[in-house]
Amino acid sequence: MRRNKGLMISAIALAGAFALSGCTDSGASAPSAAPVEEVTFDEGTTMAALNEAGEITIGTKFDQPLFGLKGPDGNPVGFDVEIGKLIAAKLGIEASNIKWVETVSANREPFIQNGQVDLVVATYTINDARKEVVSFAGPYYEAGQDLLVLEGNPSKITGPEDLADKKVCTVSGSTSEKNIAAYTTNIIATDTYSNCLGPLRSGEVDAVTTDNVILAGLADQNAGEFEVVGNPFTKEPYGIGLAKDDTDFRMFINDVLEESYDDGSWAKAWEATAGSVLETPEPPAVDRY
């Protein structure tokens, strides 16, 4: 349980304005720092341990514009990053005391299981297979899998049904790889979505597939080269990964998410990052399983 002892708002937060990040070509900017709360927690909880340590390690993507893109100072920027900062602030941890670790699709569960990160906020789709080994808070956003093609769509791809005789690139270990396998076996799998752009440019593949918001960020970062088909064919609820069966921590994060919906900080985080390209959606209801 959390017990508030007052608010300790940083000078940056008092500025109340959004500061643009160094990665302006990503379409993302960084909001002012979230108010950091002076709080105490029940002994023995993950929240108490992190609060006492005064720091937290969060895994996120480093190559996904709008959600998690490495900035010139080495730290990532994007919507996922801002969600991580909101959680840290409610733990009494300043944003400067967050250690960001790059997590690609294939290593998110191992990093959580091995204790290399405390949380993963990395366009991380909640599904039953993953819930066998880690727990999820959220969802905090729902995306849908789509296709990225060359500007002008020369291959005339309108959906996954058009991929039977075409090649597609995605990321190894992702839900996107599993989903697209139902439509084609001509799949090139790599470690990051940005590594699919070269093969798409050269014609080695006809399309790249992952969640529509990730594709929108890649298209925005490479203006005039690519376009999103705009026909999502799955639902991808993004969750926050944490250690299996840490129920208290999961419920705490769900409380933080719901508070951010109510106080407008979730919407501000979206508008300062992904909202530079995409309309502000309604936040999804968290799962209280």
Image: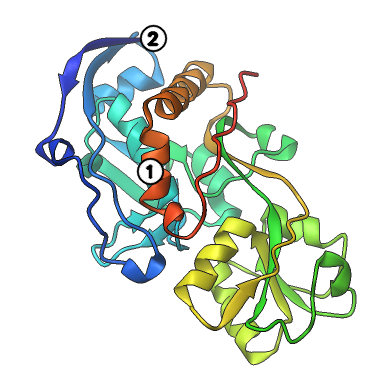
Q: Which residue is mark 1?
A: 269
With 95 as the anchor, is 2 left or right in this view? Answer: right
* Mark linked to residue 2: none
Does residue 27 appear to the left or right of 132 in the view shown? left
Reading the chain from its start, which is encountered first: label 1 or label 2?
2
Left or right: where 1 falls relative to 235: left
Q: Amino acid at mark 1?
A: Ala
Along the viewing direction, whichever of 187 and 33 lies nearer the viewer: 33
Q: Residue at x 35, y 55 (%)?
A: 77
At 34% from the left and 49% from the top, the residue drawn is 100
Query: Tag 1's secondary structure?
Result: helix
Q: Nearer the viewer, residue 98 or 20?
A: 20
On the question of residue 144 being in view, the answer is: yes
What type is the residue that disc 2 sits on?
Met
Q: Quadrant of the C terminus?
A: top right
Residue at coordinates 63% horizontally, 82% vertically from top-left? Answer: 151
Left or right placement of residue 76 versus residue 135 in this view: left
- For the question of whether residue 67 can be seen, the reply is no
Q: What residue appears at the point 80 percent right and 70 percent down from the top-left corner? A: 158
Give the percent coordinates (x, y) of residue 85.
33, 39
Label 1 – label 2 distance at C-alpha: 25 Å
Q: Residue furthest front?
A: 279
Residue named by callout 2: 1
